[in-house]
Image: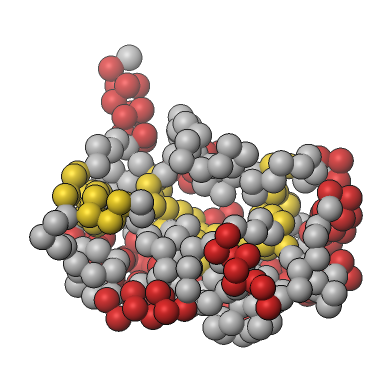
Amino acid sequence: MILSVSRRTDIPAFYTEWFFRRLKAGFVLVRNPMNYHQVSKIVITPQLIDCIVFWTKNPKNILPKLDLLSAYNYYFQITINPYDNKIERYLPSKKEIINSFRTLSRTIGKEKTIWRYDPIILTKEIDTAYHALNFELIASKLEGYTDRCIISFLDLYQKSERNMKQIKLETIKNTKMLEIAAILSKIADKYHIKIETCSEHMDFSPVGIEQGKCIDDRLLSKIVGQPLSIKKDINQREICGCVTSIDIGAYNTCGHGCLYCYANYSDTAVKNNFLKHDPASPMLVGNIEPEDRITERKMVSYLNKQQVLNFCD
């Protein structure tokens, strides 16, 4: 099983104590985002978890605890964008994030430390030249600390569109996407970084960019040391290439306050959920309630299953 930590929130930045308590307990409870009282019990022991995929914008808080992951395979995706605190409102400085990225890479290896430059947005001030300049500044700092960068262009969901009203966005047409991608690809090559796209309908192969997978069976197989056969995640968008995983996050719990984020509905909801968070609870937000229906999720280790099959053969 692949554990996603998490598309819905930044657990490494805000909930490391809770996460490592859950690893020690061996399970986590996750509410269904569409059905509040439907709760899944997810076993997260090393025997079942083939790999953990961490998503974060600030790995600083998890760095001192990496030794607690010694029984697990894992890799990190770290978003570093060129935006200021008008858009990414509560992030620390880019210098601090880059320093943490480099420390993480030195500890676990550059192959398991992936840079995300997404979403790409355009305004009158944040134009093609702005992206070219700032992408190169970041890439130059990450040279030798990663070999992959995942990019995507902004998709405006209803929630993020509402939050972005104060930012006068410009429509990014296909020709402009290709232009920006070509520039970024050339810069990335200079710093020995391979760019891949995330959930993009457009073909960027003419500028040397392939469609990637954030939860990538190729990388997973390399990390665990043998081929893994994992199906595409049917719960993601059709264009998404990610393989199946189980996410243990919750919406409206990320404190970074990025205006383009699809996972936060409002600042008020985030503040309320922060107040409800208990590091000792089996749930990220709140605790078990009388009306909850808890069902243990049926899971299998792709790695151990394959080992059993090979033994039987």
* Residue name at image x 80 percent, y 43 percent: 204
- Tell me the colour scheme of the image: secondary structure
Q: How many labels does the image show?
A: 0
Q: Where is residue 287 in the image (x, y as percent from the top left)?
A: 19, 67
Quadrant where the N terminus is found in the figure: top left
Q: Position of residue 9 (x, y in %)?
A: 44, 65
Q: Is residue 228 left or right of residue 294?
A: right
Is residue 58 among the parts visible in the rendering? yes
* 177, 272: nearer the viewer: 272
**From this viewpoint, which residue is outermost toward the top?**
313
Q: Position of residue 201 (x, y in %)?
A: 71, 41
Quadrant where the C terminus is found in the figure: top left
* Residue name at image x 67 percent, y 62 percent: 119
The relative height of residue 223 versus residue 191 in the rendered view (above or below) is above
* Residue name at image x 45 percent, y 33 percent: 230
Q: Quadrant of residue 114?
A: bottom right
Q: Quadrant of residue 291?
A: bottom left
Is residue 110 among the parts visible in the rendering? no
**From this viewpoint, which residue is outermost toward the left?**
290
The relative height of residue 103 versus residue 251 in the rendered view (above or below) is below
The relative height of residue 38 versus residue 307 in the rendered view (above or below) is below
* Residue name at image x 19 percent, y 44 percent: 296
* 228, 93: nearer the viewer: 93
Q: Position of residue 99 (x, y in %)?
A: 60, 79
